[in-house]
Amino acid sequence: LSHSRRCKDTSCPACEPVRDVIRRSQAEAQAEASRGHTISAHEVEARLLNQLLQEAPAHELGGRSGSSPYGYGGVAPSMSSSSYNAEQRASKRPRVHENAVMSPAAAGSMGSHHPAMAASMSTSRTSAKGTPSAGSSATSSKPEDASSFSLINSFTVDQIEKHLASLNRMSQLPPAQLKVHCLDLLKVLMQHEHGWVFNCPVDPVELGLPDYLDIIKKPMDLGTIQKKLERGDNGQYHSLDDFCADVHLTFDNATLYNEEGSTVHSMASELKDVFVVEHKKVLAQLKSEEEARRKNDRACGLCGCEKLLFEPPVYFCNGMNCASKRIRRNSHYYIGGGNQYFWCTTCFNELDGRIPIEVGDLSMQKAELLKKKNDEVHEESWVQCDTCERWIHQICGLFNARQNKEHKSEYNCPSCLLKMRKRQKKKTPGSASSLPGAEALPRTKLSEALESHVRSRVGGHVRSLAEGKAQSENIPLEDAMKQMSLGGPITIRQVTSTDRKVEVREGMLKRYKHKNYPEEFPFRCKCIVVFQNLDGVDVILFALYVYEHGDNNPAPNKKTVYISYLDSVHFMKPRKIRTFVYHEILICYLDYVRKKGFSTAHIWACPPLKGDDYIFYAKPEDQKTPKDTRLRMWYIDMLVECQKRGICGKVTNMHDQYFTREQLDASDVPYLEGDYFPGEAENIIAELDKAKGKGKGKKGGVNGKKSKKKRKKKDDDDEDWVEDDEPAPKDEVMVKLGELISPMKESFIVAFLNCDDQSEENKEVPKAIVEYRKKAAHEAVDNDGTTDGSTTKDNNGTDGNETKDNDGTDGSGGDVAASSSDTRKKRDADGNIRVVSADSSKSSAAEADGSQIKIINDDEEEMDCEFLNDRQAFLNLCRGNHYQFDELRRAKHTSMMVLWHLHNRGAPKFVQSCGSCGKEILSGTRWHCPVCPDFDLCTDCYRNPHTNRGACTHKMEAISVEGGGSDESGGSGLTEAQRRERQRNIQLHIQLIEHASQCNSRNCGSQNCAKMKAYLKHSLSCQIKASGGCKICKRIWTLLRFHAQNCKVRDCPMPQCNGIRERIRQLKKQQQAMDDRRRQEMNRHFMAARAAQLGR
């Protein structure tokens, strides 16, 4: 069918069966019409599809078919996907379309072959049971459970209207299309007879206008606008309104500076009128195109688009030689192990077919691996509104298929819901959604400190931006405040806090073993996520991973903080506060850890390579990746502000701190996971060992003292040895590594925090910072804290989070911090929370309604989140479920689903889908084929004798599926005592499961040993497994994962331990592969730049 719509060859043999069926259907319809029988469009359509399905061989239809929006099966084999990609195939009752070839666009385009079919497309429905029925009526009965599981149902009228407006393609033109429209408008203005006056910047010196810059605060001209449009791939404008604002500013500046009646004033007024007319023409054209798209029955009823594709899936090779490299697009690869492991063609050819492939706890033969081509394309899923019966994208409608377990929930699209609310004159939400938001996530001391700090400062910064905008653009302050208004409240939550260890690599450990170099360094990994409520949805905008090496660490990692990874998307409103908010988060965090006694902070300023993502998968097309110089200055600006506030002292780099001091060797450099040093040091050690051979004495440096070294006299031939005192040679690793990083040393930032025991040497700051602190302190005394949120306050860095006992502030830093009385009141108003975040033992705070909120001590309690414990796990979750951030609408849906996973941590992250109808099997019974790879059927399709099973003819096994609950949601509702008891029980169960796995006694003295053995036996034989929803398997899996994270036994007898550790290693390999790529690219870039300089 798909081929015949595009084929123009009238003699094509592939199209002939389709044409025959269409001709016979038309003939039957005409014959019955001549006899006086009328046939509905639905019946014509059903007959046509039934004939095609009956006449086509099963293997041609494909074994993994999905359901179309109109109840058709039959998916091309290339469109099938594994259970890892099943999230996007979720279905809402039978009226959900999941990635089938028969999309609304495809189904509607069949109308060119059969008019009656096209007429019936908008009303074609399936029966309530989910099985396509030729005689089913156009309107099915309402389900018994009418509760909506859509987040949109909790929106107010204003939020629904804003959400619908955000889906309008006019307001979010693609960068290429935006550039074309803007350049066309600009060409009309620049080629106008008066355009030459405004095509170049005004030169006050050449034109003799000494007061120009005093009157015009923000100069602008058409030439500068053209450069901004053409700069880079995407330009500097993100919307048509931004472009228009600069054009209007160009002419408004001219009319402001030149008196009315003057030549330039008249020219500017005339050109502005021309622009207004041309701009209206462009808007009218865009509006007509938008209306035409929305009238199309084959398109989404909300966004007006038809087939929207996700980013192609990413696979990493598990071969020995590839080191988790990506498998190239459109190349062949091999898959096995339940679709969990992949091999590129090169690695597959190197496998020995006689030797089993051992991967974790799995063993497979080379012949069992299936060959596939990396050319899969996945389409966005659809859902049908129960009111207007139009099909819309699930992402546009914020539909959560994971909540729709029985496929019987009623769904109203945003447009219908808005009409109902307006008819009812109801401005408030009709019912609360069952999808809790970011505010409901557990709170910690760290998250409370960050959130209260940012919220206390962002209002003043927004006002200062509005004042600057009003002054530069000559508009009223109220209009400027409206344009710069905050999109919604900012929520900051800490989602993980786990103990981890970075293992020292073999070369480093062996080379410095004589210095008792540790085998591992423990650290605390914390993940911080920032949300902003946009149009009623808490959207994830920023994420930060930090590693805290506490006082229990051996040198050189002791009391060290590593800013590991951070990532963001540009949807924050207003967009101009992004840098301010993210800087304030980092500043507050450094102040927080400074008060806890941490002394140094390390940052590797290195942007991701093209095609790589740090945390967020598939970012917006118009969001540029910063260059290394820009990213470095971004961090430096933040640290300079820290110096102004007395949070940190000396800011230097790794090269100047460690590699210029001859008494130090590589064992004195902090060994941080994901950092540049561990990987590059290992490469250099390997090169030295290869050059000099292994076992040639100790190669580590000395400990800083002069050593006694024997040397032979060279002036005679006797064997006379003398002892001589001479400086020890510098460590070869340090020499080579120092030479390597010298050109790029500014990218490895080291900041010394002003903790209590910091040395005076490390508290030193530049003279300009000292003068700034003194000046700010005097201004604070003069102002007496009468201003709050003004420009002076923001620039001075007066911060309610700062205290008077800052170290290293020359006696002025503390005064700067406590200068504003309003700032002190702001801190007092949130006193309980603020004190808790710093050094108080309180563990609760009050909500606005007076209810108590438990605040978790993130340093003492474990906050485990399987898919956010490290960034690679989160990336895999997003890739497997098509959780993308490239558009605002997708970022909204992704954030909604991530929050659902956070509040339902016990639910499976990836679910199986029916191989016939494409629905996710979230509850009930899943019928699994033990022979065919990754093939399951839902109960309805299994019982239907006409179900197309493709090539599968085997006996299927019934597997019960239990709905995943939120039993592991983090325990935010527990009391302090209950939370401690929960942690204690987890440790006791881990000890019990370790004992039971090794106990061979039938009469064990432990009362719970036999019960735990039964649980372990159940987990080995259970067909449901944790991914299917078995509660026992979930708990056993959680305990096994906790054990495996710390287990080092090579052949651990614990069930699944080796498999879990192998999966953890695979995640580390993927992360390490990306770190190696960016390290190698960084070396190549700076070495090439250095060679170019030497060539001059």
Image (cartoon, grey):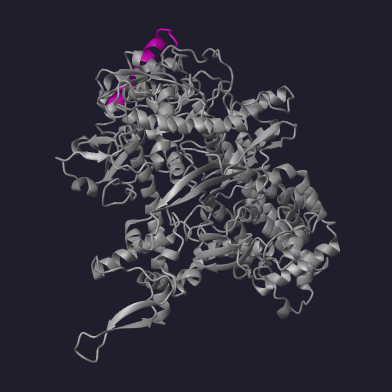
Residue plotted at (56% across, 44% down): 859
Residue 303, image x, y percentages: 56, 36
Q: Is residue 389 above or below residue 106?
A: above
Q: Is residue 697 above or below residue 315?
A: below
Residue plotted at (62% across, 30% down): 975
Which of the two residues, 435 or 571, is positioned nearer the viewer here? 435
Which of the two residues, 147 or 930, is positioned nearer the viewer here? 930
Residue 197 falls left or right of residue 621: right
Whether residue 867 is visible: yes
Which of the two residues, 753 or 373, is positioned nearer the viewer here? 753
Whether residue 573 is visible: no
The answer to which image quadrant residue 60 occupies is top left
Q: Is residue 535 above or below residue 930?
A: below
Instruction: Please tell me how many numbered marks the rendered image carries.
Output: 0
What range is drawn magenta here?
A: 17-38
Tell me the quadrant of the picture where the N terminus can be found: top left
Residue 716 falls left or right of residue 114: left
Residue 1030, image x, y percentages: 41, 23
Residue plotted at (35% across, 63% down): 514
Residue 668, image x, y percentages: 45, 65
Residue 892 falls left or right of residue 355: right
